[in-house]
Amino acid sequence: MGSNSGPPSGKPKLAPFAEVHPFRLTEPPNARWKVGDGLSNTSLGKKWKNDEKQGWKTWEMAKTSPSDATQILNSTVIPRPIAFVSTLSTENSPNLAPFRYDLCLVSYNPPIISVSFRLAPRQPKNTRDNILATKEFVVNLISEPFIEAANETSVEAPANVSEWDVSGLTQESSVHVKPPRVKESAVSLECELFHSQDIFPDGIMVPSATLILGRVKYVHVRNSVLQPDGLRADPAKLRPTSRIGGQTYARLGEGFDLKRPEWSCVKQVLRAKL
Ligand SMILES: Cc1cc2nc3c(=O)[nH]c(=O)nc-3n(C[C@H](O)[C@H](O)[C@H](O)COP(=O)(O)O)c2cc1C
């Protein structure tokens, strides 16, 4: 649907996408917080405390259907960054799909990244199968300017259709692994399979998910998103996206710095209090 065609009837009208959306640093929620203070004594903290009166809803996961568990977990463990994983089949067919489960830095020495695949019965997950067969993949971070193209690559297309064609994005040769990287991505990580772990539902011999750990061999970052130190990416320029449950994507708007506490200072305050 084009941006001028308006929302389908019955749906609330959405604000237009704000292209100018600078990322800014603000003060932290409670700049006066002190060791041992717990919940902040701000209006936000007081409201949070007051909300306790509504109690908790608790699910025993063993008695919760997988579809309810998905809804609960997908909307609570957020935000989850998203990235395309680019792979080649053993016949060298290129494959591209977006993922957000377990997309995480596991270690930086050695650099290890994780991604996990949900498996439906009798439905292949080509990316997973390609990684297990070829031991190589590229993780490409997804930014706002190509989020629609990225979303489209999640289509369950027949095996003879390349998601690259669906997306209209550009293949760029990797330097170490065979699968290409996504040229439009500001960050691409060339990976070799480090470890894989199938995950099984209780009492069932067919895996419902596979966790993949990749050893990052090369990192490509667009110069235009780097900070002046030439090492760190600037979040305002990277324009990263994440998933926050359902079909909703989120973007970065604001951040705040909190200094890492030093034990020598914390110790003194605790001593004075006790
Ligand atoms: C934003 C987004 C994130 C996704 N994350 C995951 C994920 O973490 N794990 C997964 O198995 N599928 C995920 N999917 C669905 C896959 O992209 C989809 O099943 C795709 O068709 C898999 O392609 P493949 O079979 O070529 O690997 C996601 C889809 C979208 C749109």
Image (cartoon, rainbow, N blue to C red):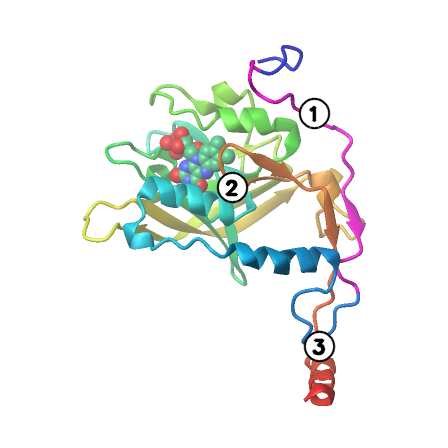
Q: What residue is pinned by disc 2?
A: 139
- Indicate the secondary structure of the residue bearing disc 1: loop
Is 164 magenta? The answer is: no
Residue 163 position within the rendered picture, expressed as x and y whole percent measured from the top left: 45, 24
Of callouts 2 and 1, the N-terminal one: 1
- The residue that appears at 80% across and 52% down in the rendered structure is 26
Q: CA distance from mark 2 to mark 3?
A: 35 Å
- The residue that appears at 28% across and 51% down in the rendered structure is 63
Visible in this render: residue 223? Answer: no
Which is the main secondary structure of the residues drawn in magenta?
loop
Amino acid at the residue labelled 2: Val
Quadrant of residue 49 within the rendered picture: bottom right
Residue 155 position within the rendered picture, expressed as x and y whole percent measured from the top left: 42, 24
Q: Nearer the viewer, mark 2 or mark 1?
A: 1
Residue 160 position within the rendered picture, expressed as x and y whole percent measured from the top left: 35, 19
Quadrant of residue 127 within the rendered picture: top left
Q: CA distance from mark 2 to mark 1?
A: 32 Å
Q: Is mark 2 within 8 Å of ligand 1?
A: no
- Residue sitting nearer the eye, 240 or 223: 240
Amino acid at the residue labelled 3: Glu
Amino acid at the residue labelled 1: Ala
Query: Compared to 66, does 42 lie above or below?
Result: below
Residue 15: numbered disc = 1
Residue segment shown in magenta: 8-31
- The residue that appears at 28% across and 31% down in the rendered structure is 123
Of callouts 2 and 3, the N-terminal one: 2
Is 22 magenta? The answer is: yes
Of callouts 1 and 3, the N-terminal one: 1
- Indicate the secondary structure of the residue bearing disc 2: strand
Q: What residue is pinned by disc 3?
A: 262
Callouts 2 and 1 close, C-beta under 8 Å: no
> In which quadrant of the rendered image does the C terminus lie?
bottom right
